Each structure stands twice: as structure tokens, then as C-alpha cells.
Amino acid sequence: MNYLEAYDKKSGLLVVEYPLIGLDLPALKKLLNIDEGIEIYGFDVTPAQVRELARYISGPFTADDTCDYQVGFYRE
């Protein structure tokens, strides 16, 4: 499972993780324009990418301007 992670801009601490439902790793890398062969554990995303990724979050989501966002790639 991969996650959209929100980090507080002031403290740098992780505030919340949103599971990205129905978005497998190859599709996620394609959406973020990351080469398929590159091994990545975290990736900063732009506000436009956050809006695109929000489609894969189950439940309510609103981007917070006080947070920076990153995709966390988790291996299961």
C-alpha cells in the first residue's frame, strides 16, 4: 500500500497518512513521472499532484496549506 503523507511545514512532523486505494506502484510511478526501475521510499509531490492523488483517497480529503505532502512507498 502506498500513502499520501502530510507533514507540518513548521515542525516537519508527520500529521496524517492517507492510503491510496486502487493505485498500484507502476501506475503511481507513472502518475508522478518516476522511472519504473527506480527504487523510492518517499517522494515530494506538488499541489497539482496532491489534487490528482486525492482521487485515490477513500473518504473526505482537503489539502492543507500548512502541510507539505509526500508519497510514501511501502513494501508489503
Image (cartoon, helix red, strand yellow):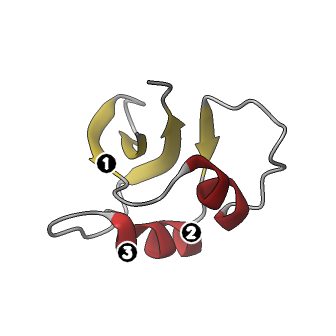
Q: Position of residue 69 (x, y in %)?
A: 47, 50
| Mark 3: few/some/many CA within 10 Å (<14, 14-19, 20+) | some
Give amino acid for label 1: Pro
Query: Viewed as shown, does residue 75 lie left or right of 63?
Result: right
Q: Quadrant of residue 51?
A: bottom left
Mark 3 or 2: the one toward you = 3
Circle 2 sits in a helix, a strand or a loop, which is it? Answer: helix
**For residue 54, side relative to residue 46 (left or right):** left
Q: Position of residue 68 (x, y in %)?
A: 47, 50
> Which mark, by number, is residue 49?
2
Q: For the point 26% across and 70% down, which residue is it?
A: 62
Describe residue 75's horizontal placement relative to residue 33 as left or right: left
User: Which quadrant of the rendered structure holds the N terminus?
Assistant: top left
Say if 43 sits above or below 13 in the image. Answer: below
Q: Amino acid at mark 2?
A: Gln
Residue 55 marker: 3
- Residue 19 is labelled as 1
Label 1 to label 2: alpha-carbon separation: 15 Å
Q: Secondary structure at mark 1?
A: strand
Under tag 3, what secondary structure? helix
Location of residue 2 (image quadrant): top left
Measured along the vertical axis of the image, is residue 64 above or below residue 67?
below
Sequence-first disc among 3 and 1: 1
Q: Which amino acid type is shown beneath numbered disc 3?
A: Arg
Q: CA distance from mark 3 to mark 2?
A: 10 Å
Question: In terms of depth relative to the viewer, which is nearer, 74 or 4?
Answer: 74
Q: Dot 1: few (<14), some (14–19), or many (≥20) neighbours within 10 Å?
A: some
Q: Choose between 40 and 48: the one closer to the eye.
A: 40
